Image (tube, coloured by chain):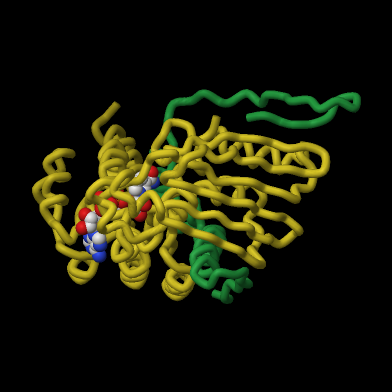
Amino acid sequence: MSDAVLSQFKQKEEKKEEKAGRKLRIGIIGTGGISWVHFYQYAKMNDVEIVALADLEPWKAYERIEQFNLSPDVRVYSSDKELFDNEKDLDGVSICTYHRQHAGPTINALEHGVNVLLEKPFTVTLDEAVEVMRAEKRTGKFVSVGFQPRFDANMKMIKKIVESGALGEIYYIQTGGGRRRGIPGGTFIEDSTAGIGAVGDIGSYSLDMVLNAVGYPKPLTITGYTSDFFGKDPKYNGEDAKRFSVDDFAAAFVRLEGGIILDFRISWAMHPTLPATRLSSARRALSAFRRPTAGTAPSAVR
Amino acid sequence: MTLYHDICGKCAETIVPLVEEEDTNFYKKVRSFLDAIRTGGPAPVPTSQIVINQAIIDGIVRSAKLGREIEINIPEI
Ligand SMILES: NC(=O)c1ccc[n+]([C@@H]2O[C@H](COP(=O)([O-])OP(=O)(O)OC[C@H]3O[C@@H](n4cnc5c(N)ncnc54)[C@H](O)[C@@H]3O)[C@@H](O)[C@H]2O)c1
């Protein structure tokens, strides 16, 4: 074949690649503990470029650049605000900050036209969640909330069983789960950073597991209880007991639309283990055990 | 997972086999986000669902503080 013919082919191929799109430009805000997994995933993908990082403690971001062998051109900022003031060309950001810093940076991202992968829980308060959603509506950009067990094959199976009708009309759901000893440390246990304790950290996963299965009906009324007996006790929580200012246990009785009762308990620490997740109808029930440590565990269900 | 049901008037249990697979959940969480950017959405785990999760968490915290049952209203967005 002549060069002219060959170059025609080549041009076609290049056009195709162009269509498949340029690399997505990604930023990561909050480069602490969980950000590692985001770096690890993005770094594996060849259609993605990590271009900017932000952390209140920028040394953490520099450490990640080294760990993942990222380009020295990656820009590092000391807050989400500084990042968005300077970066005009981002396609998306992972927001991996502590809970009190979920809503602010997420709204900031949306206002700058950037889509967000936000770590769980969504926010601390309902008001913050509503503000984030209004920003989504205003800007036409979107937020995806980082519940990875959503993608778990066994979690999907629970939803499939419910949707198949094999259970019948569900009227009573128990969910939650307990660690007997499993209080985290770091930024998870102070009101100023976390805002909520076990109820947000691991409770949000249990709620997602059942609510997603039954199609996320709205809550009508709630009787809730929270406590902190273990977190505040040096016998169980050592030095951290002094600064512990969130819940380590929560229980609730929730009436959901559609005549469904949700009975929920979650613990970072308590004496007994807590029951498995159960979905009951007048005909049948399904029981699934959610690993209390699951977050990043291989499968959330057994 | 276990399915509880009756068979010929007796209480019975059926085991639903678990799927054993490699842990790719975190990969899928990130990949689905990137794919949604390319297609212009919708979000794989949308706030329209998770706001209900958040309303429950928020309700638990508020009810616990008040020491009584409360009604939940999620504002129109
Ligand atoms: N999906 C999972 O499996 C999983 C597991 C662990 C944690 N998480 C979630 O990830 C989030 C972070 O947890 P972590 O353990 O990495 O916490 P962390 O405290 O280790 O990291 C948070 C980082 O965010 C930084 N930060 C806070 N506000 C900021 C701002 N405005 N701009 C820039 N940086 C800011 C802090 O300096 C800190 O380095 C939490 O929401 C947590 O619940 C999810």
Q: Is residue A69 above or below residue A57?
A: above
- Does the image show residue A39? yes
Q: Is residue A114 visible?
A: no
Residue beneath the point at 71% across and 31% down: B3
Q: Determine the image quadrant of residue A111.
A: bottom left
Residue A32 lies, in percent from the top left, at 23, 50
Q: Where is residue A8 in the image (x, y as percent from the top left)?
A: 31, 39
Q: Position of residue A16 (x, y in %)?
A: 37, 43
**Image coords of residue A62 (percent x, y):** 11, 49
Q: Which chain is yellow?
A: A
Q: Give the quarter of the image for residue A190.
A: bottom left
At 41% across and 41% down in the image, what residue appears?
A: A295
Report whether B54 appears left or right of B13: left
Residue at 56%, 62% (x, y): give it.
A224
Q: How many marks?
A: 0
Give me the residue at 53% from left, 33% from top.
A301
Q: In this view, does A210 lie above or below A57?
A: above
The C terminus of chain A sits in image quarter: top right
**Letter of the chain in green:** B
Residue A157, relative to residue A1: is it above or below?
below
Q: In which quarter of the image is the N terminus of chain A?
A: top left
Instruction: Name the quadrant containing residue A138.
Output: bottom left
User: Foreground residue, A36 or B30?
Assistant: A36
Q: Is residue A189 left or right of residue A179?
A: left
